[in-house]
Image (spheres, grey):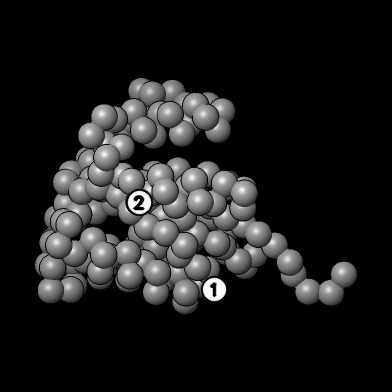
């Protein structure tokens, strides 16, 4: 078969360091746009972004040319640098060290997009920690909660 034909859809979740409420509603759309630009530079595509003041959800289509770990590292480091150097000048801002990356079937895409866009309502009932534990359980990912949070 000639060429590469793939569908690599991933729902990423990570928080700010210490789950500090550093992402302001007044600039989060700019942050998502900047992250989309980072992704474009890596031949990835941001499908949807959302979150709360203490965490982010990114739904992306990835190319075959980058590992998940390298992708997250590039997005985190470049977006953090942008936050520090832009007019925002939020010097204390940092992302947590870890992340979640969950595969998504194309048939579930609209459900994932709705979930990401509905973060404010969702977090009226559930904390970030509860949400992340639900993802780990749903995807049957083993973890020791003593070492899960930074």
Residue at horizontal 38%, vertical 49%?
116
Q: In this view of the protein, which residue sits in the foreground, 134 or 75?
A: 134
Q: Secondary structure at mark 2?
A: helix
Provide the residue designation for mark 1: 43
Residue 51 location in percent, x, y? 30, 49
Residues under numbered marks 2 and 1 in contact, where contact means CB atoms less than 8 Å apart: no
Q: Is residue 78 toward the left or the right of residue 52 in the image? A: right
Can residue 1 be seen here? The reply is yes
Which disc number belongs to residue 117?
A: 2
The structure residue drawn at horizontal position 50% and vertical position 59%, both measured from the top left corner, is 60
State which quarter of the image contains the N terminus.
bottom right
Which residue corresponds to the image point at 17% horizontal and 73% vertical from the top-left?
A: 86
- Viewer-proximal residue among 63 and 123: 123
Instruction: Please identify the residue farthest to the right as the structure is shown.
Output: 1
Element at label 1: loop
**Residue 122 picture location, percent across and down:** 30, 37
Q: Left or right: where does residue 104 sit relative to residue 71? A: right
Q: Is 113 on the left-hand or right-hand side of 23?
A: right
Give above or below for 115 relative to 70: above
Q: Quadrant of the C terminus?
A: top left
């Amino acid at each position: 078969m000639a060429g590469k034909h793939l569908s690599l859809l991933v729902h990423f979740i990570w928080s700010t360091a210490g789950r500090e409420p550093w992402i302001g509603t007044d600039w989060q759309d700019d942050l998502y746009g900047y992250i989309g630009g980072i992704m474009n530079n890596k031949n990835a595509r941001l499908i949807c972004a959302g979150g709360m003041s203490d965490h982010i959800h990114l739904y992306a289509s990835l190319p075959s040319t980058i590992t998940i770990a390298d992708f997250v590292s590039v997005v985190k480091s470049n977006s953090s640098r942008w936050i520090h150097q832009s007019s925002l000048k939020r010097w204390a801002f940092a992302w947590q060290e870890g992340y979640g990356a969950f595969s998504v079937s194309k048939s579930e895409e609209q459900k994932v997009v709705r979930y990401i866009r509905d973060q404010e309502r969702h977090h009226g009932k559930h904390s970030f920690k509860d949400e992340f534990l639900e993802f780990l359980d749903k995807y049957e990912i083993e973890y020791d909660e003593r070492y899960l949070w930074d």
